[in-house]
Image (cartoon, helix red, strand yellow):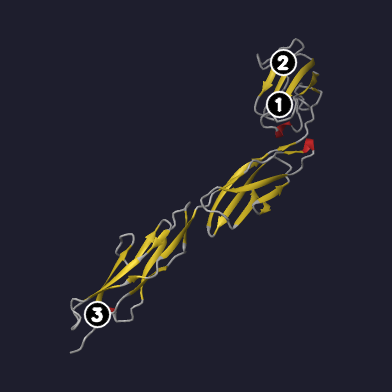
Amino acid sequence: VTVYPIQQPSSSVGIISREYLCTSDDEVVTLKALDATAQDKDWFNTEYTWSTGEKTAEIDVVSGGTYTVQITHTSTGIPGSAGVTCTGSVSNPQAVVEYDVEVSIGAITPIDVDKGIESTTAVALETGGSKDYDSFVWTLADGTSLGTGKSVEIKLNETSQILVQATKEECFDSMSTTVLVFKPIEVPNAFTPNGDGIHDTWSISGLETYSEAVVKVYNRWGNLVYETYGGYDSDNEWNGTNNNNGGEVGMGAYYYVIDLNVEEREPVTGHVHIIR
């Protein structure tokens, strides 16, 4: 009598794709049941039972954890082996790591040329569940490199958007923020709103860098004739008209108050003359 034995399966788990997941994307890790049995598998049926409850030779997982598989061989009716069942042990569990990469940028001190502060430091904060990210890359919005590392020194001439991208393995996250650059302001003491295209508006150099500036102008009787909030630039420069009625104000001196809305900065005050 010839006996065809059913060999004890040897089960383990192999990874077909990468060995980790990123919390921020929709990637999956594909696991495969590995049966090291050398016997001709035409002699028996093979069944798989994963720790997830799935019954296929391969499974896709979408979260980190440890996964195991049990392999069972059952006779297909070969003489001498009918009714024999062998179950493989769970000998090699497979761990799948999940990286939670999230980055933010700490508070940044504005660059204030008027106060002699010509650079500032940006610091990346690891705010995800994973730590010890592999890299940090800093750029401007147009892609210009600002350097690498958890912190960088930044020198800018204009208020600009900066971006940092943090990476661990192939998982990444990014964040952007605005670095303010305050320039000295130069306030003209006169302008000529006569429509000749020369000095028709009260153009204040440097004031456009103060996005929260408030400008108010009063006549000799203390009446408010012009005001603007949330910055002052070429779109809203005073053109010598009265905000209250849209009419032209007369020639003469007008008192102004410019509140930069910057910490430790006093309002800028003085007189501007209208010449027609």
Residue furthest to the bottom in view is 1
- Residue in the image at 79% along x and 39% along y: 116
- Camera-nearest label, 2 or 3: 3
Q: Disc number at residue 248? A: 2
- Label 2 SS: loop
**Which residue position holds label 3?**
43
- Label 1 SS: loop
- Image-based side of 200 in relation to 20, left or right: right
Q: Is residue 130 visible?
A: yes
Mark sitting earlier along the chain (1/3): 3
Pointer 3: residues within 10 angstroms few (<14), some, or many (20+)? some
Q: Mark 1 to mark 3: distance in Å?
A: 90 Å
Q: Amino acid at mark 1?
A: Glu
Mark sitting earlier along the chain (2/3): 3
Quadrant position of residue 12? bottom left
- Image-based side of 41 in relation to 249, left or right: left
Q: Mark 1 to mark 2: distance in Å?
A: 14 Å
Q: Residue 227 location, x and y as percent?
A: 68, 20
Pointer 2: residues within 10 angstroms few (<14), some, or many (20+)? few
Pointer 1: residues within 10 angstroms few (<14), some, or many (20+)? some
Depicted 224 relative to depicted 71: above or below: above
Q: Could you tell me which quadrant the C terminus lies in?
A: top right
Q: Disc number at residue 237? A: 1
Q: Residue 189 location, x and y as percent?
A: 82, 23
Q: Amino acid at mark 2?
A: Glu
- Image-based side of 6 in relation to 120, left or right: left
Q: Amino acid at mark 3?
A: Trp
Mark 3 and mark 2 in contact (Cβ < 8 Å)? no
Q: Could you tell me which quadrant the N terminus lies in?
A: bottom left
- Label 3 SS: helix
